[in-house]
Image (cartoon, rainbow, N blue to C red):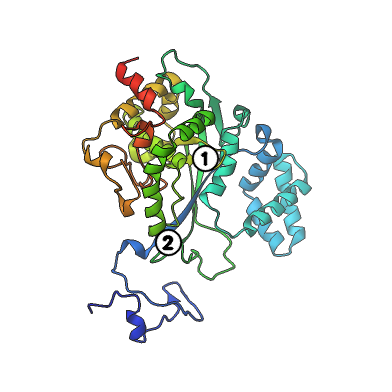
Amino acid sequence: MGDIANPDALKSMNVKCQGSQPWEKWESCDSPLVVLQRGASNLYYAIVRSALDIPVGSGGGHGASLLEDMKEHPLFSSCQSKMDQGKEAVARDLAEDIAADLECSVDDVIAAMTVQDEEEGARRIPDNEELQVAEWAVLSSADVESLTNKNFVARVEKDQPSHDWGLSKLISRVVLLEKLREVRAFCGYERVKPGVAVIPPAGRHNDITWLPAIQVFGEGIFIEFNQHALKEWEAKASGFIKNRIDPMSKKHSEGKVSYLPSPSSRLVLLHTFAHLLIRQLSFECGYSSGSIRERIYAEDGQAGVLIYTADSDSEGSLGGLVQQGELKRLYPVIAAALDQASWCSNDPVCSEMETQGVMGLNKAACHSCTLVSETSCTMNNLLLDRKLLLGDETGKGLFTEVLAHIKEGR
């Protein structure tokens, strides 16, 4: 049994896959069998996609809100089912009842069912980056406050404090999300190696056109960074950044971790900033660190982080997180987070290691200074480096001057 875990062990024993699963029987399967220890971490990689329920169009639009009201009407699913079965007369009768309740036309209801069919026709699992493109467009828009509906309420923080340690030069805007809705859908899973083959949750049952999902409500703080200041720092500290990012990029390519984005200076910087802020906010706002989550916007033309809480219990609606997002409180929280991160109890080991963490995908980041709960991080506590924020003797981080002002007490 010593070689049973080798990739070709069962092939030499002429053991083949029977194409069966506990819940179904497949016609055939040519995939090679691999022996894994029961309970091994690579036995099951869940694919979960998370999206914020954000309004589309100025003010959310009457059409958008009407469509949502139709979908939530108790007769809508029955009407949709009858239409799919070809019973148009029955479906139209139900549509008339829906139209009467919502004070719209029957044609509006029929059109909503067509939109529903188009939405359900998409089967490809979207990337997280694709989902966040629309989120960024709304959160960074100038009229975000007008895009209000029952699941989304935003307020731009405008009262600049007199004492900011220079943070206002790096942060261009803060948007307080007093209410938001997040949907998390289980899109399938992978085995042995992530990114090789996706197994849908419904197997080969093509007649199942839905995915198991949950919706949760919460609040959040969206911090948009000054892209001009970021680009200026990236240009001035290019050598320092390259020395920090290159070892991480090498480990990323060697590890073939398709579930993680490629490390870039902006991604690692914003991701690390989000972790430091989550750790500090858990002390300031009363939420447990495991209930605070992050979303990182670091694609081309993006530079921001969303720190939010979205839980099914009361921790999603206490209001403490939005209160801490007011600039008179947020800037001191950021200052405290940077000050705490400037020294780690594992230093100098933590700050001087070439790489650390799983597959060596972290630089200066460990449990004592940067890592957060697994439920809070979107990247498995990887792609982190606090030196990109703070700098060292070899180069300046984005917040080096801010940290100097904090240390001086100015």
Which residue is tagged 1?
181
Give the percent coordinates (x, y) of residue 39: 30, 64
> Which residue is located at x 56 percent, y 37 percent?
151
Q: Residue furthest bottom?
A: 14
Within 10 angstroms of label 2, few (less than 14), some, or many (20 or more) residues? some
Q: Earlier in the sequence, mark 2 or mark 1?
A: 1
Q: Report the label total.
A: 2
Q: Is residue 27 visible?
A: yes
What kind of residue is marked 2?
A: Pro
Q: Nearer the viewer, residue 219 or 370?
A: 370
Determine the image quadrant of residue 326: top left
User: Quick check: 10 above or below 204?
Assistant: below
Which residue is tagged 2?
194
Give the percent coordinates (x, y) of residue 186: 48, 56
Could you tell me how far apart the alpha carbons at marks 2 and 1 are, in whole angstroms?
A: 29 Å
User: Quick check: 289 above or below 406?
Assistant: below
